Amino acid sequence: MALSEVYWDREIPLPKLAPVQAKVTVALVALLCFINSYDGEFVFDDSEAIVNNKDLKPATPLNNIWTNDFWGSNLSSNSSHKSYRPLTVLTFRLNYLVAGGLHPVGFHVLNIVLHAVISALMIDVFAILIGGLAYDENNRKLNHAPKTSLLAALFFAAHPVHTESVAGIVGRADLLCALFFQLSFLTYCKAFNRGSDRDDRFSVQWVVVSLLLCAAAMLCKEQGITVLGVNAAFDVLLICNVNVYELSQRLLLRKNPLDVSEMLRTGLLTRLALMGLGGLSMLYARWRIMGTGPPAFTEVDNPASFAENIFLRIVNYNYYYSLNAWLLLCPWWLCFDWSMGCVPLIKSATDWRMVWLLLLWCVLIGLISQALCSQDSQRRRTLTLGLVLLVVPFLPACNIFFRVGFVIAERVLYLSSAGYCLLLAYSLGHCCYHWNKYRKLLCVSVLLLLCVYVARCALRSHQWRSEQSLFTSALPVCPLNAKVHYNVGKNLADRGNTTAAIRYYREAVRLHPTYVHAMNNLGNILKERNELIEAEQLLSKAVSIQPDFAAAWMNLGIVQNSLQKFEEAEQSYWNAIRFRKKYPDCYYNLGRLYADQNRHVDALNAWRNATVLKPDHSLAWNNMVILLDNTGNLGQAELIGREALKLLPNDHTIMFSLANVLGKLQKYKESEGFFLHALRINPNAASCHGNLAVLYHRWGKLELAKKHYELSLKLDPEAPGTRDNYNMLRRKLDQLKRSAP
């Protein structure tokens, strides 16, 4: 098992640090790279996975995280993405409990700390993969490549492609998966007896613990199961010292057949059988939990996987691989989303981008040939294990075994980048060994590369601090990506800049003519700007493209109602409810339609349905009280108002409406109490001051009435009826003064 010191290691232009010093250095570099994201906002996918995920709330039963997906949807649902990551969700829930709510600082800090810990542990992983598993006389693990492992860990700590996983809170899944991946590998290394020189001794218990840690990695993110492939490669190449080139020659040429008894003696087959059985058990359990069906993705998510021509499908997959490789080599063009036209499909063999595929495979074939055929055993093992660590964790994202829901995702490169960093550190060490006269130049190059990485990480993590900067940063990288334009537009609309938002929504629809969400949002803005004809056209097109788009049906109903197309509006509302059974806002708008048509009973029923589905639906409660008040049903209005305030005790609009009802019922004292309570919550409500003044006027408290009339007119001089009532009160006061003795 023990190997001699790695010959190129001493030439690496780094100081030889003690193990603790090396880990602290790497951790500090990791912190330096991403520390400026600690106080960022919840951005992009954080909204669905954290802000809107009920599984984080203390009121939600803890068992729900074991039956729901990463986004809080039930795994049995057809709309579920089948991402089963309960341990990751559990850490989100703990963040929520510790912070006492949704405060992003705690979430970000934990991500940064996790990356620092993972980066420090990478030293141990790289040391074993490069220099082998060796112990001193005190059974302490030796590092035969201290400088190479340190350099590789520094590259890993500072690689900019990690920004999405560290600065984006949902990247917690990748971080936890990587941590348990490392622990599973390091635990597997412990399985080999340190106190004996016999190669046939290993601990089954440690292998089992390694499998349990692999299961934990898989419960953080599906990619975690790939550690079994790395463990197997490590066992074959380093523990059993198998020469892969010679082994392949034996199998291909059928010379010197494999000595199975030797494999049995070393325990290799036993260990591989244990890992194979464990891996199959995990996959079977995962398949059962998932509902025995894969998630349903659309052509928008992964267009290459829908290509009918298998040659073009394979070509585009390989082009995606080359783009992922480029992100590792030159992580400058980074984007939060690479879908929707960001990477146009290759549609013919004459496309100039075919050069990148050829270049990728030329490099890979060159590395593989060196890994297999080199006479240098250390180079052979390092290159082979580096390639294994690069390729194996990437396999779940490569579209070979199943269709994935993305084109490129920087987060899936978090583990694969470790293999790249190992190969990069080896390449620099190899250059230093053979080109010793250029040592200073290489030293400057290494330092410069690390500085560029750190600067790029700092810039990119700053961009991840807010949705505005994140979405805007993607425009020059993926100008053809409709989703980028959509997200920029949505962010602008949320901040009130609807004029600019319209421009980006229109561009999103131009780039992707069937982008129904962009049509829906654009239609909404046009509706608010009273551009109803175009809004109706856009929303009608959206529901024709996606007939089950409930939100678009509801918005279409609102527009049709405004255009006085009452029958069409009613049908649109019912279509929305048909596709989304629990849709309180749609029932509310349906009630408004019925109220406009004087169908009072239907309106009350619709609003009651809204409050049943959403008990805190303030507008529905308030409209019921107002409608009953206006139709003279004051007793029922009072009951509804009191029921509403039990659920919404601080809603000043319901207090105002109930106070009006009580005033008409001549319950002046109670009415006054509700008016005053409403004014304590919202003291600048002119209408509330005006109606309280009317109450005092009726009640005979004329001076108080005068005071509140004046406050109302001060807040809103054009308040309808208030000026007339105030003038009437003044005339009455004048009469009283004249008639006084």
Image (cartoon, grey):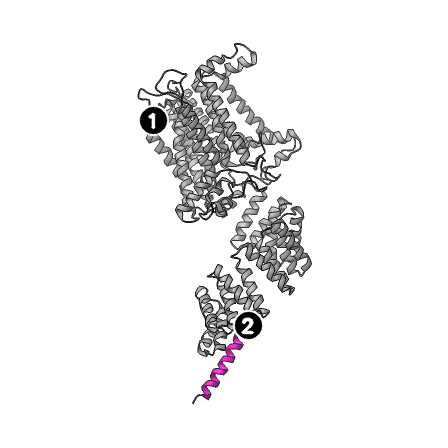
Say few, some or many: other residues with alpha carbon within 10 Å of mark 1 (under 14 / 14 to 19 / 20 or more).
some
Check disc 1 and give the amino acid type: Lys
x then y, percent, for residue 458: 43, 40
Is residue 718 on the magenta stretch? yes
Q: Residue furthest top?
A: 256
Q: Nearer the viewer, residue 341 or 70?
A: 70
Residue stretch in magenta: 713-741
- In the picture of the structure, the residue carrying the numbered disc 1 is 16
Q: Residue 587, relative to residue 321: is it above or below?
A: below
Is residue 702 visible in the rendered image? The answer is: yes
Is residue 441 visible in the rendered image? The answer is: no
SS of the residue under disc 2: loop
x then y, percent, for residue 468: 50, 48
In the shown orientation, is residue 559 left or right of residue 695? right
x then y, percent, for residue 318: 58, 29
Q: Nearer the viewer, residue 86 or 458?
A: 86
Q: Quadrant of residue 140?
A: top left
Q: Residue 502, relative to residue 25: is it above or below?
A: below
C-alpha separation, residue under disc 1 versus residue under disc 2: 83 Å
- In the picture of the structure, the residue carrying the numbered disc 2 is 720
Q: Residue at x 46, y 77 (%)?
A: 706
Say few, some or many: other residues with alpha carbon within 10 Å of mark 2 (under 14 / 14 to 19 / 20 or more).
few
Which mark identifies residue 144?
none
Q: Earlier in the sequence, mark 1 or mark 2?
A: 1
Q: Nearer the viewer, residue 385 or 100?
A: 100
